[in-house]
Amino acid sequence: MQYVEIDQAYEMSLFEDLEGHEDSLIPIERSIYNHVIYDSKVERDFARALDGMQEVKLFLKLPGWFTVPTPIGDDNADWAIVWQGQDAFGEPQDKLYLVRETKGSLDDAARRGTENMKIACARRHFGAIEVDYSDVTSIEELRKSIAADK
């Protein structure tokens, strides 16, 4: 299977539907909106941690309709994060990271087989368009995955 970049954009209005999520909103400052919808306590804590990190320039919880087709079924990345690091010369450099999972375990044996296959496909998809993609369960693991990318 090969992934190919296409010229496609989404209307911003598709990201604005908050109706029915009033009990799952937290106020956020480092996002394109002033609130983020979360699906679990882990996601809520992850969003709060992202919002407090100086390195995070912008982040958003991707909506359920934002999917990547894979041979196993559609995969829905959880977060888009713009992280400010440094290039080889010590100059500030922003980079986009997509994080797949913010719950459960990184242990393949602890997850469903289809979930592991979707993650593998999403890694190939985003790798083909040079966007970093990983699955993490905590902010500490996010930091490790970004440090490993350098």
Image (cartoon, grey):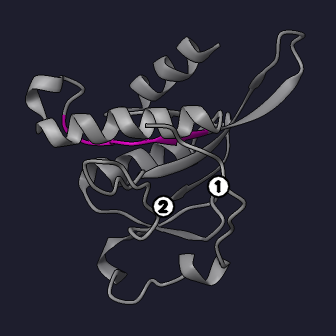
- Magenta: main secondary structure: loop
Residue visible at 38% across and 37% down? 121
Q: Is residue 114 part of the magenta span, yes or no?
A: no
Q: Is residue 82 above or below residue 75?
A: above
Residue visible at 64% across and 72% down? 10
Q: Position of residue 131 (x, y in %)?
A: 62, 36
Q: Nearer the viewer, residue 22 or 136?
A: 136
* Residue 146 badge: none
Nearer-N-terminus badge (1/2) = 1
* Residue 84 horizontal side relative to residue 141, left or right: right
Q: Is residue 4 above or below residue 92?
A: below
Q: Nearer the viewer, residue 37 or 75?
A: 75
The answer to which image quadrant residue 114 occupies is top left
Q: Nearer the viewer, mark 1 or mark 2?
A: 2
Q: Position of residue 2 (x, y in %)?
A: 50, 37
Residue visible at 42% across and 51% down? 77
Q: Amino acid at mark 2?
A: Leu
Residue visible at 40% across and 45% down? 46
Residue where numbered disc 1 is placed: 30
Residue where numbered disc 2 is placed: 62
Magenta extent: 97-104
Q: Position of residue 67 (x, y in %)?
A: 43, 60
The crowd level at tag 1 (other Cα within 10 Å; few <14, some 14-19, many 20+) is: many
> In terms of secondary structure, where does tag 1 sit?
loop
Q: Nearer the viewer, residue 65 or 117?
A: 117
Q: Position of residue 76 (x, y in %)?
A: 38, 56
* Residue 7 horizontal side relative to residue 125, left or right: right
Q: Is residue 35 above or below residue 99?
A: below
